Amino acid sequence: MFSGLCGQLDLAVVRFPASIDPAELDAALARVSLVEITNSDRTMTTESILKGGTVLFAQSLPASPGSRFSSSTRIGNNRADVEVALGSGKVEANISLLEGVKVGLRNFEKKNYSGSGALPPGPARIISVRQASGVSPSVIKGKSKLESYSFTIALIAQYTP
């Protein structure tokens, strides 16, 4: 590795349990280190807007501007394939998560998270955001009812030269 030429690219996919304004989320991310808040299954931070997030994926990779690279990793029944192009002040990322689901024998579910955007060296930034809300049926003790849900999934990146 060329330690003088390489920086560190941190990527994470985080699911927050509510609809969050992307501008507010980006402002909160500017005040934290992506590696520190995603060091667990849940986001760990004093920033109230970032609390309670579920970390779906987090990885730190050596990278330098102008590079394209990919990696694959497997933990337990989960596989993550990452493809990244890091340009001068810009990043394009595609993360595919293949998860084992508990239906039958050896069933898998594939989810893709991708995005691109400006990524100057410094604080973490949102690369892409998905928001969803709706209602779903719920059955508790034989009684069914409709419960509303909303969530935000963010693909976040941070580059440190």
Image (tube, rainbow, N blue to C red):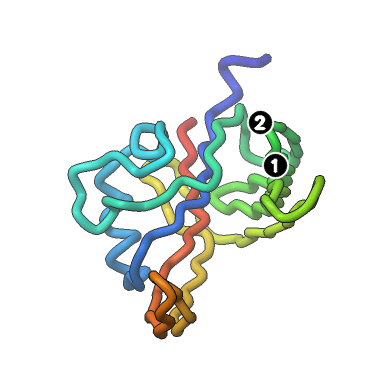
Image location of residue 76, percent across then percent down: 67, 31
Q: Which residue is mark 1?
A: 80
The quarter in which the N terminus is drawn is top right
Residue 149 at what x, y percent from top left?
40, 76
Sequence-wise, the earlier of marks 1 and 2 is: 2
Left or right for 21, reference 154: left
Cα separation, mark 1 vs mark 2, equals 9 Å
Residue depicted at 45% across the width and 74% down the height: 139
* Residue on which disc 2 sits: 75
Q: Amino acid at mark 2?
A: Ile
Q: Is residue 136 above or below residue 43?
A: below
Marks 1 and 2 in Cβ contact (< 8 Å):
yes
Q: Which residue is depicted at the point 46% across and 46% down?
A: 55
106 horizontally vs 84: left or right: right
**Up-down relation of residue 11 to residue 101 (above or below):** above
Q: Residue furthest front?
A: 142
User: Could you say whether the residue bearing mark 1 is in a helix, strand or loop?
Assistant: strand
Label 1 or label 2, whichever lies nearer to me, is 2
Q: Tell me the quarter of the picture where residue 152 sits.
A: bottom left
- Camera-nearest residue between 156 and 123: 156
- Please tell me which residue lies in front, 33 or 161: 33
